[in-house]
Amino acid sequence: MAPTSGFPTTVPAFKIKAQLSGLLPVGDIHTGSNLTAVTFGGGSLKSVEGFTPKLDAKIVNGHDWFRVDNDKKHGRLSISGIATDDEGRSLRVIAEGLIELNEHTAPVLFGGPDAAGAADMPFGFAVEYVKFEVGHEAYKALDNALFAGSLRFGKSAEGLYAEIAVAKIVAGSGFE
């Protein structure tokens, strides 16, 4: 077995649930990809048990500039959102990602008749890197860390949502 020294690891940190509120097609752009604005206006950002800083915030606004590759096999996520805690402290959430376009993801993203089946979608088709911009001392540690996420879509009484399991990336160690 090859040595694992130096490779980063991850520590579970947050669950993000963003309520999708609209798809605004922009169309084919100069790069050859198709651009759609995906808006969201509700949801939550909660730290998992044992992670610090502890965070329990509401997503108040956000969007994803979603680009579909010219070959229609993958989409590229470019997300920016605002979450606010009960004390009124806000933080910006930024994510870049890659999603496989298949029978699970495409109906949700393009509004197809099979979007209702999104509730059964497992994790495993999308990855993201996540970072934060924070001005409040209680959350400053988030400013100095990078995170990785795995995304899936679901359906609730409020409609479609994106759920992201987010883990902090911890630098590798050792000399090998």
Image (cartoon, rainbow, N blue to C red):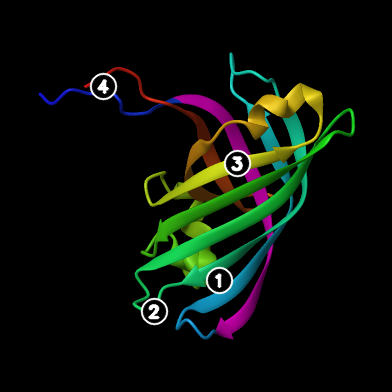
**Front residue of 175 and 48:** 175
Mark 3 vs mark 4: give the one in front.
4
Q: Give the amino acid type for the residue marked by disc 3 in the picture.
A: Lys
Identify the secondary structure beneath mark 2: loop
Identify the secondary structure beneath mark 4: loop
The span from disc 2 to disc 1 (Cα, nearest Å) is: 19 Å
> Could you tell which of marks 2 and 1 lies nearer the N-terminus?
2
Q: Is 113 above or below relative to 6? A: below
Q: Give the amino acid type for the residue marked by disc 2 in the picture.
A: Asn
Residue located beneath label 3 in the image: 131
Q: Position of residue 35 (x, y in %)?
A: 56, 76
Residue located beneath label 1 in the image: 111
Label annotation for residue 5:
4
> Could you tell which of marks 3 and 4 lies nearer the N-terminus?
4
The span from disc 2 to disc 3 (Cα, nearest Å) is: 27 Å
Q: Give the position of the C terminus as an image quadrant.
A: top left
Q: Is 8 above or below relative to 29? A: above
Would you call the spot at circle 2 few (<14 residues within 10 Å), some (14-19), or many (20 or more)?
A: few
**Residue 9 colored magenta?**
no
Residue located beneath label 2 in the image: 70
Q: Position of residue 104 (x, y in %)?
A: 40, 59
Q: With 173 as the anchor, is 168 left or right in this view?
A: right
> Could you tell which of marks 1 and 3 lies nearer the N-terminus?
1
Mark 1 vs mark 4: give the one in front.
4
The answer to whether the residue labelled 3 contacts the one labelled 4, judged by CB atoms less than 8 Å apart, is no
The answer to whether the residue labelled 2 contacts the one labelled 3, judged by CB atoms less than 8 Å apart, is no
Mark 2 vs mark 3: give the one in front.
3
The magenta-colored residue range is: 11-28
Q: With 14 as the anchor, is 174 left or right in this view?
A: left
